[in-house]
Image (spheres, grey):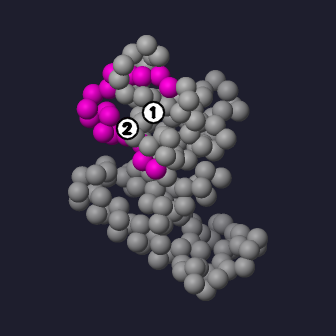
Amino acid sequence: RGKLVAQHDGDGSAAAALKSLDAERQTLLKANAIKKPKTVEPIDEHSLFAIPDRWAWSRLGTCITDLRYGTSAKCRYDVEGTPVLRIPNVSKGVVDASDLKFGNLSEKDRKDLRLSRHDLLVIRSNGSTSLVGRAAIVGETGEGLAYAGYLVRLRTVPEFVFPGFLRL
């Protein structure tokens, strides 16, 4: 609610950042780098609490450029192929690539599921409520790897949306 730290005039407005992010999304769409996102309903700001002037209400879908489930291909330790991150690799807010399985992924899947630095991986399903929603930011160790279907990748433009904030 803007009560933890002082607001600085040089911070700019969230509305301007969202507009720049939308322009970046349009550029990515024209280049066929991302799929067209689903239309999201506007937020009824009157039903929510008041926020500082330079802030803006936004749905998660307008803050990311891509949201994608991982591969459903069977992955094993004894297979040569593409390294695939799984639920145990999402730990303490970062990607732990010390225990990887490998899958035979198509070229298209390798391209579509290739992780980039600053991507956010979130555990989307599992039998344990203590694991669902756990998130990790992809750093150097996870860059270029693929990820399993129990995970979902959220991709942002870090200049406009800080992945660490989304993880929290």
Residue at image coords 51%, 62%: 161
Q: At which x and y percent is residue 126?
A: 60, 27
Residue at image coords 31%, 49%: 35
Residue at image coords 49%, 31%: 85
Amino acid under disc 1 = Tyr
Q: At which x and y percent is residue 9?
A: 61, 86
Amino acid under disc 2 = Leu
98 drawn magenta: no
Circles 2 and 1 in contact, beta carbons < 8 Å: yes
133 horizontally vs 77: left or right: right
What stretch of residues is rendered in magenta? 100-117
Q: Nearer the viewer, residue 96 or 20?
A: 96
Residue at image coords 40%, 72%: 20
Residue 113's disc is: 2
Marks 2 and 1, how far apart in space?
Answer: 7 Å
Residue 41 visible within the image? no
106 drawn magenta: yes
Q: Nearer the viewer, residue 111 or 68?
A: 111
Quarter of image, res 43: bottom right
Q: At which x and y percent is residue 63?
A: 48, 60
User: Residue placed farthest to the bottom in the image?
Assistant: 9
Residue 112's disc is: none
The answer to whether 47 is drawn above or below residue 113 in the figure is below
Residue 152 visible within the image? yes
Quarter of image, res 68: top left
The answer to whether 73 is drawn above or below residue 158 in the figure is above
Structural crowding at the residue carrying mark 2, measured as other residues with C-alpha within 10 Å and reported as few (<14), some (14–19) or many (≥20):
many
Residue 147's disc is: 1
